[in-house]
Image (spheres, rainbow, N blue to C red):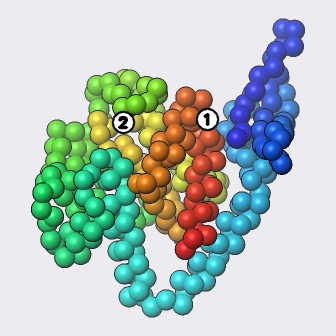
Amino acid sequence: MVTLVKKKIGKKTFYYLRHNVRVKGKCKTVERYLGDKLSKNIEYIMLEFFREIHKKEYDYLEKLVKQQKKGNKKLPKSILEKNLKDFGIRFTYNTNRIEGSTLSLKDTLNLIQEGITPSNRPLSDVKEAENHYKVFMEAINEKRINLNTVLYWHYKIFKDTKPDIAGKIRTYQVQISGSRFIPPSPVELNPLLKDFFRWFNKNINKYHPVELAGIAHFKFVSIHPFGDGNGRISRLIMNWILNQSNYPMYIIPYNKRSRYYSALERGHIKNNPLIFQTWFLKNYIKTLWHK
């Protein structure tokens, strides 16, 4: 992974980018000297270094995306619409299941396609599944997103189950169960959200779509602006970005949640989004390869 390294020689500090990789069982270190002052664009400089290191993966990614786009052009409109609905159901199941929903994929399918409410399941899980699916299908048609957009998404998902927090920025401290990462305090949230959307609008046409999707997910969930539902909103932002750029959308599977959480945790502790992006790029490619 790409990390920023400081080396002190005498009274001066020098900066390097470092990447450690295993080649035939041996650890190899690649470094790039940056100088004795950090650029204001250090995140983008780190990202360029990341791209160089992962050039083969990016090339393979573009090949897979091109093949999928070519295949989709041959599909009738009705099949494309069916595929989108199927994706929305699977995305809803996995993103809610990651957050503790008890609904199975079959429950979610029957609920959304047939209107059949599963028995012996909490009503809150049922309503959040229904609402999430509706929000997803609405969200992908948005041309632009901003803070009001994500507040609206959050409100629509949780209005029936958690009306006291639905669509509201938290005014209290929260903790993430099982994580060493402590989310920002309430007084930090508004400036951080302004910075996030400023960064987002600045880089929406500058970053590769898969970079923007993964890093935006990481940054938004790091801010943790809501009392609950931060992961679900982050994953909606992720798929909105991919869809806007005509890239295949991505489902983080419930059964792979441990490594997903681990990548987020390591990125949070090190304050380095490229740690999560390494995981995201690898798994996004793997998903396309298996299609």
Q: Amino acid at mark 2?
A: Pro
Mark 2 closeness class: few <14, some 14–19, many ≥20 residues within 10 Å: many
- In the picture, residue 136 is in which quadrant? bottom left
What percent of the width, then of the height, locates residue 160? 15, 51
Element type at mark 1: loop
Q: List the residue tagged with mark 2.
A: 225
Is label 1 or label 2 in front? 1
Which badge, 1 or 2, comes first in the chain's sequence?
2
In the drawing, what numbered circle is on residue 272?
1
Q: Position of residue 69 (x, y in %)?
A: 58, 79
Looking at the image, residue 278 sits to the left or right of residue 268; the answer is right
Above or below, 35 relative to 2: above
| Cα separation between marks 1 and 2 | 19 Å
What residue do we see at 29% from left, 47% from top?
100
| Secondary structure beneath label 2 | loop
> Furthest-front residue in view?
25
Q: Quadrant of the C terminus?
A: bottom right
- Image quadrant holding the N terminus, namely top right
* Image coords of residue 146 (percent x, y): 41, 50
- The numbered dot on residue 123 is none
